[in-house]
Amino acid sequence: MESGSWKKQLRSGISNAGELCTAFPQLAPKRAMIEEVTATYPVFINSYIAGMLKGPSDPLWRQFIPDNAEIDDTGGMVDPLAEDSTSPVPNITHRYPNRVLFLVSNRCAVHCRFCTRKRKIGRSFEVTAATITQGIDYISRSPQVRDVLLSGGDPLLLPTDQIADILGRLSEIRHVDIIRIGTRVPGVLPDRITAGLARMLASFKPLYINTHFNHPVEITPQSRRACALLADVGIPLGCQTVLLKGVNDSADIMCRLMEGLLSMRVRPYYLHHMDYTRGTAHFRTSLSAGLDIIRELRCHASGMSVPHYVIDLPGGGGKVPLTPDYIHAVDGNALLLKNFQGKLFRYDIEAQDAETFSAPLAHTPVI
Ligand SMILES: *Cc1c(COP(=O)(O)O)cnc(C)c1O
Ligand code: SF4
């Protein structure tokens, strides 16, 4: 089960309505609807994931099977994070001074129905040798960029020698201190992670991998093996989870997911609130659902299992963490703080802090 099997899992994947209805006959009556949805938002499900899909009530089904709610949703925004308009060269988003997002692949191992880059995935989205070189040139002439975040599409779907070439060229840039790869591959195409790939990745300058797992069913013997191969060569692993209605919007599921991730040496990093991406409204939860989950994780699981719950501001404002409010009240020179059991404790503050906690809200203009 070395490198051949993942290529076969991609080749034998489902990529149109006809194949989908053959693989899952219960979808046949909905074929016309699926044709219509996939004309706008293409489907792709590799055979590893297809083999795990059971039926509409399973948490993978909702993530990958096209649904008419996608085309019914005409609100939202096509590019909610203004990634394209804050792009100095194609496929680079330079939002924060010291780090860039760099799209180096236009392919994914599956098409997630909730994807923020739904506008691009499986469609005409160009990644060429020229855009990669333009991106690397931009980074090399931008000395303030110390952290390069490779994404896509999924960078780990590129041929191994091409990944090595990109990492090699980025590593030669003196001011780039760290490289990060965002990938869903360890959870959705785990056989792609081979000992050879892991060794190659580990040979480059401080490299971090942020995986993407949304539900405990994605933690399988194969994905455990994939994460172990990466962790064993010393690559720090994080996880970006998306909070999805009907998939993982319960504290119990999230506790099991986060504890499962830690058991694979994957440290939860972000829990993303669903962006206002057109075609994804049926996945969006309330903010209070997310805050409740964070509160419950703090209470029932290790502190290591608690990700930052973030909203990515529409229009390209960047990520903002939301935290449950633990300050119940300010009482003179003390804070009334709520602990993990919901009990109130008095915590004396010193004069130097009194102003911070009693100051009225400052007037900052709103964008
Ligand atoms: C998320 C993101 C980053 C990385 O942000 P961190 O908070 O450092 O993980 C960088 N650029 C863009 C455009 C992003 O969306
Ligand atoms: S793997 Fe990531 S980029 Fe690709 S469709 Fe899923 S969420 Fe989007």
Image (tube, rainbow, N blue to C red):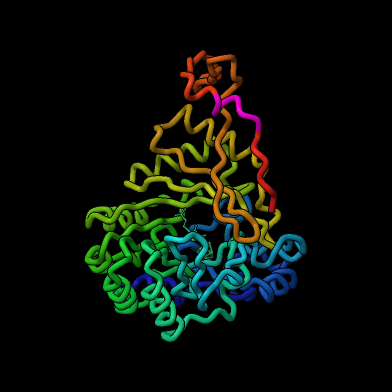
Q: At which x and y percent is residue 342? A: 55, 19
Q: Quadrant of residue 325?
A: top right
Left-right relation of 14 to 224: right
From this view, report whether residue 16 is shown above or below residue 178.
below
Is residue 365 within the magenta segment?
Answer: no
User: Residue at 62% of width from left, 73% of height from top?
Assistant: 42
Residue 155 location (% of width, % of height) = 41, 70
| Vertical comparison of 40 with 98: above or below | below
Residue 314 appears in view: yes
Q: Magenta stretch: give its range.
A: 355-360
**What's the residue at 61%, 28% (across, down)?**
359
Residue at the (63%, 38%) spot, across then down: 289
Residue 128 position (above or below residue 31): below
Q: Point out residue 168 in the picture as x, y percentages from the top left corner.
A: 28, 74
Tell me residue 307's x, y (percent): 46, 42
Viewer-proximal residue among 108 and 126: 126
Q: Nearer the viewer, residue 327 or 285?
A: 327
Of helix, strand and loop, which mostly describes the magenta segment? helix
**Residue 47 in view, yes or no:** no
Please give left or right for residue 267 compared with residue 96 in the image.
Answer: left
Classify residue 129 by image quadrant.
bottom left
The quarter in which the N terminus is drawn is bottom left
Image quarter in which the C terminus is found: bottom right
Residue that appears at 35% across and 65% down:
191
